[in-house]
Image: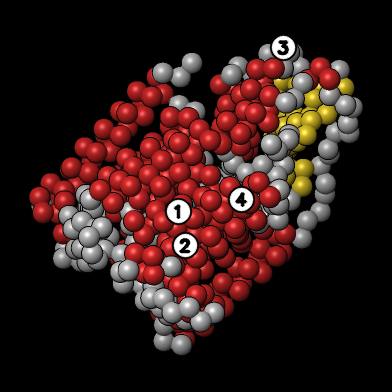
Amino acid sequence: MRKITAAKIGEGHYQVDMRGWVCPYPKYAVEPLVAKLHNGSRMDMLVDCPSATVDVPNVAEYMGCRVLEINQIGNGEWQIVIVKS
Amino acid sequence: MGRWEAISGEIKDVFYVRIWKRAWPIWAGAVALAFANIFMFAFARAIGVFPQMAMWGSWIYNLVGIKVDAPFIPYPLTPLHLDVHTMINFGIIMGAAMAALISQEFKIRTEDWRGYMTAIVGGVLMGFGTVIMPPCNVGGFYSATMALSLSGPLAGISLLSGAYLGGLFLKRQAAQAAEEIDFTALPMGEEVRKKENSFQPIMGAAVGLLLTIAAYAYAVKGMPKHAGLLLFGALFGVIFQRSRLCFASAFSGIFVSRNGTPMKWILFSIAIGTAGFAILKSQGYQQMHFVLPMGLHTVIGGFIFGIGMVIAGGCGVGILWRSAEGYVRAWMALIAAMLTSGAWVIIYGGHVGEGWLYGKPFSLGQFGWFGGALLIYLFLAAFYVLIKYVEAGRK
């Protein structure tokens, strides 16, 4: 099974790297990931699929999260900042 | 700020930032797609991409000494640079590459062998689906429904069921991978930060220049249809890339995520196109264009194609524009799909539309062009209500 790489950046701040996962994988993964996050914590999801910049925020916001930023971090790569509130 | 500074700022915002830097809203992509298809039909033909890809597959077989005819009779074996239909696909690839580069969204996106195997299986399924249905999602559902072919709505329902199955498979894979992550036991890591500088916009402009030169060369060589379809293809490539309008995702999202927003806009797009196609056909123009054989094969082929397009990461047109964004997964699916469909005449023993497998084409224009369009609108309305019903069950 393929693995998603993730790291802790600071207290209550995590980074989940889904670069290399074609759409719609990030859209499907964000739901179980957000469900596991503690309230108030921040998850930066890294994606390289353009559609994920629309789909992932939609799902996160539907689940009651705040999407603070969508930053392009390189050619065809984005960081989506999600805070569970 | 001076008047000229304000004007140049506004021009930059409209013609650079909004078109090339920001993603288009999905409704803009859907509306643009409909008008592009009406204009291209008026120019030559409607959009459909798979029959010519199947011809590429047959062409490759012949190149290595395996004699096989191309599966679709109106798309005979032709050197690719001379094939008028191939121009649409080349245009889509170049247009999407140009858009991806200008917006700095191009990246060679590699995966591990499991991703590629999934893409190849998806490509093979689409390869079989396209010759059995026929042809593909964009041709067999989107254009065919606009063209008042009864096969279009039937293909839509079949694609929906196949896409649901494919979507469940992908969702399970994503959920299993997400399950492994434990936020309380993650190793410390570095935050990935923004990188600066990119030459991609210049490369994108170079692709645009190449496209213009190629179209001009065809035009001066006495092949204006080739030139026009290359440019129309490029327009489609830009629309798909910038609006992220993905049919595979739109179909699978309805039942898997209970989110039908993209499909609702596709239905709206078909509604615009239906009016355009009905008007043109009512004037006697190409009345049987994209009126396709229909029967049980439409249901089976659509179902197979529906599974394939979701697990491959895009339908026929989806793997074309995604291949131009640098998805190696799409390249794998493309090769598998063309080599599968290209061998159809050997596998089946006949061409698409001939023999025991295929039914007859049925045009809703038989009820008059107004009546036929009305029936399509009823289908679109029923599809819309189904989506709303499914969405209402979202937790």
Q: Position of residue B8 (x, y in %)?
A: 65, 54
Q: How many numbered marks does the figure carry?
A: 4
Q: Earlier in the sequence, mark 4 or mark 2?
A: 4
> Where is mark 4, residue-wise?
B117
> Where is mark 2, residue-wise?
B340
> Where is mark 1, residue-wise?
B126
* Nearer to me, A7 or B366: A7
What residue is shown at x 69% (from left), y 17% (from top)?
Answer: A36
Q: Amino acid at mark 4?
A: Met
Mark 2 and mark 1 in contact (Cβ < 8 Å)? Answer: yes
Looking at the rendered structure, whether the residues under marks 3 and 4 are on a common chain is answered as no
For the residues labelled 3 and 1, the Cα–Cα distance comes to 43 Å
Q: Position of residue B232 (x, y in %)?
A: 44, 65
For the residues labelled 3 and 4, the Cα–Cα distance comes to 38 Å
> Where is mark 3, residue-wise?
A39
Is disc 1 surrounded by few (<14), some (14 to 19) or many (20+) residues within 10 Å? many
From where the camera sits, is residue B196 visible?
A: yes
Q: Earlier in the sequence, mark 1 or mark 2?
A: 1
Mark 2 lies on a secondary structure that is helix
Q: Position of residue B208 (x, y in %)?
A: 60, 68
Q: Amino acid at mark 3?
A: Asn
For the residues labelled 1 and 4, the Cα–Cα distance comes to 14 Å
Q: Quadrant of the C terminus of chain A?
A: top right
